[in-house]
Image (cartoon, rainbow, N blue to C red):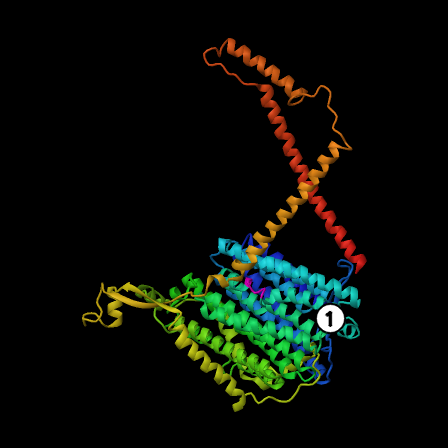
Amino acid sequence: MKEMVLAILVFYPFLGGLLVWAVGQKNEKARNILANVIVISEFALTALLFVKYGAAAGEAAGKGLSDGGSLLAGSVPGICGFGLHFTMDGFRLIYVVIASFMWMMATVLSGEYMAHHRNSSRFYGFLLLTLSATMGVFLSADLYTTFIFFEIMSFTSYVWVAQEESHAALRAAATYLTVAVFGGLVMLMGIFILYHELGTVTISGLWQAASGYPDKTVLYAAGGCLLVGFGAKAGAFPLHIWLPKAHPVAPAPASALLSGILTKTGIFGILVTCSDLFLHDVAWGRVILALGVVTMLGGALLAVFSVDLKRTLACSSMSQIGFIMVGAGMQGLLGAENALAVHGTFLHMVNHSLIKLVLFMAAGVIFMNVHALDLNKIRGFGRKKPLLKVIFLIGALAIGGIPLLGGYISKTLLHESIVEFGGGWAMRTVEYIFLFSGGLTIAYMTKLFVAIFVEQNEDVKRQEQYDAMKHYMNPQSTLALGGSALVLLVWGAAPYGIMDRAAQMAQGFMHLEEAGHAVHYFSMTNLSGAVISIVIGAVVYLLFIRRVLMRPAEVICTDAAAAQTGTRGTGKQAAGDVQTVYRYADRWPSWLDLENTIYRPVFFKYIPAVLEVVCRIADTCVDLLVVGLRKTIYRDSPIPHERPEGNLVTEMAGRLMNLWQELANRTWRRKDPLHRDYVHILALKNDAIKENHMIIGRSLSFGLLLVCIGICLTLIYIILW
């Protein structure tokens, strides 16, 4: 039975998803209840596993078991000859609990959010299918199993992005799937190379096999392929392009999971490459660190410029993924003394998951009441909604790294790992960018909070409608948001009792044997980093966002507006007067959109154009060769009694129709005769039918030819490698 537990965790939501979809075709209320029962029971099972094995995971960390101390293992044999293999250590145990908790809260919120959406049964079905695939990734014991569930997850989560079926949603879904499939195929190449060179793709055995391999270049090539695949899902630069496009169009519960959990499956893979394939490798650490710095800063800049609530949160996710990758890179640079980086990386993963659950669900509550995400339209929505204001504020302060909340603890650890390494001007630059990115985080979260919960909407009637909304979410949604915010608050309030212990449970996954020295989180040295980021955030918000990213606009003052400002009849402002208001403006240069500026033109325009020229040249050369052969070796011989057009059947039928036409012209159609050559008409129709058959045959032949070429190339690769 023990061996079946992990398989049940993985496949139970899959079967549940199919059942939920089937029930939803008949009864939506029963569907919602069944979906809630499935996710709650999944969370209960993971919680029971945590209660039973959590202490053992802590003991494994205390004994310095660098493989993480496998607590459970299981497999499903016979899948494609390799089978599916699962394992659970401290890291995996914590993350399946977090994943099931987030799915539970998102599903509870979906009851109200999806109440008036089309195809909601489809959404619920794929919600649970994606949970199954996500569990499969986190519990995978080898890269083959990881790849299988990684690709399943990409296809099932694609439906989330395309759910609304609008033009923007379908375009974003196409971008998401393109990046996911491209990354998956490149990752598969890396797995092939590793299996051929090392003889294993079992995660726990990679380090031992890789440490004795003589040619590091081959391993770097394989690691690079894995990094492309996992980085695409994580939203790392330069494959981040799906993040700002997918989140605004996906339903809010799906956005919370896309940002909070699915990106962590990519980080899971990146940590496998850093800890199991290139443990303490300085060169690899530098690559990950560089990508992390660019991702961290780039996402923060995008978020500062964004004027869409969910797009801002999506760009924020990209930035926080960069923070996590900085920690992963520092693990390689610090070598065996990387406890700060290991703990900071893991804790920021957990923090980001819980924070984005709260923030995206809050954004969902706003959207289902206002049906808008533009800051100028939702401005002032939360002024008189204290519960939503507190919930959003907890998430905003946590992600900003404000002391007494979880984000401060993980960012402090990451910052201290950079300081501990030293390393001259290069690492000082990394530290400055780290603090500056933290300041940008505070700036754009301040922008969101002030716009939604402090400022008034320029449309006075709309503001009155917002203020009058007292029942803006039902009790189930309140429970989902309030419960998630409470967990986030408790998690961050106990850095020594909860967060440090969780990090120690997970450290074996990253091959850390010692816990390292105790960190005094609230010492003046560590608090100074947070203070610097807060000051930077205040300066950016006041001097850049308020003065540069807001543009003035003139509106006509109404009676209500004059009365609200208290200036009616004072001579300062009256109804009908022109009033100047400031609106949030999207000033991000369009040419910096990598998807529209580089990726789409290159892959959908320039590369096809070049290939078209190459194919035309090859086609012309073949035609010339055929003509030359027909004129020399294979001379054309005249065909005896060759018909000028058509065949015997078309000629006979055409002659009969011509005779019938002549008879009609001499009798009943003498006043309106017809003169058609039916021999020619039928010959043309015969030629058209032959041409269609030829096109179909050539297309089929061309497709089969491409398949054969692909099979041959695969066989050549297998033989040579």
User: Which quadrant of the figure has residue 705?
Assistant: top right
Query: Residue 532 location, x and y as percent?
Result: 48, 84
Toward the viewer: 165 or 661?
661
Q: In which quarter of the view is residue 717 placed?
A: bottom right
Q: Which residue is drawn at 53% across and 62% down?
A: 594
Residue 174 in the image: above or below residue 311 = above
Q: Can residue 258 be seen in this view?
A: yes
Q: Where is residue 534 in the image (x, y as percent from the top left)?
A: 46, 81
Q: Magenta region: which residues?
A: 238-242
Q: In which quarter of the image is the N terminus?
A: bottom right
Residue closest to the eye, 707 or 215 = 215
The foreground one among 290 and 463 is 290
Whether the magenta-drawn stretch holds residue 181 is answered as: no
| Residue 239 lies within the magenta run | yes
Sort mark 1 into few (<14), some (14-19) or many (20+) by Cα contacts within 10 Å. some
Element carrying mark 1: helix
Q: Is the magenta stretch mostly helix, strand or loop?
A: loop
- On the picture, is 545 further left or further right than 521? left
Question: Type of residue at label 1?
Answer: Ile
Give the x, y percent position of residue 457: 34, 67
**55 or 430, which is in the foreground?**
430
Res. 357 visible in picture: no
Q: Where is residue 73 in the image (x, y as percent from the top left)?
A: 74, 71
Q: How many labels does the image show?
A: 1
Location of mark 1 (residue)? 203
Residue at image x 45%, y 73%?
A: 444
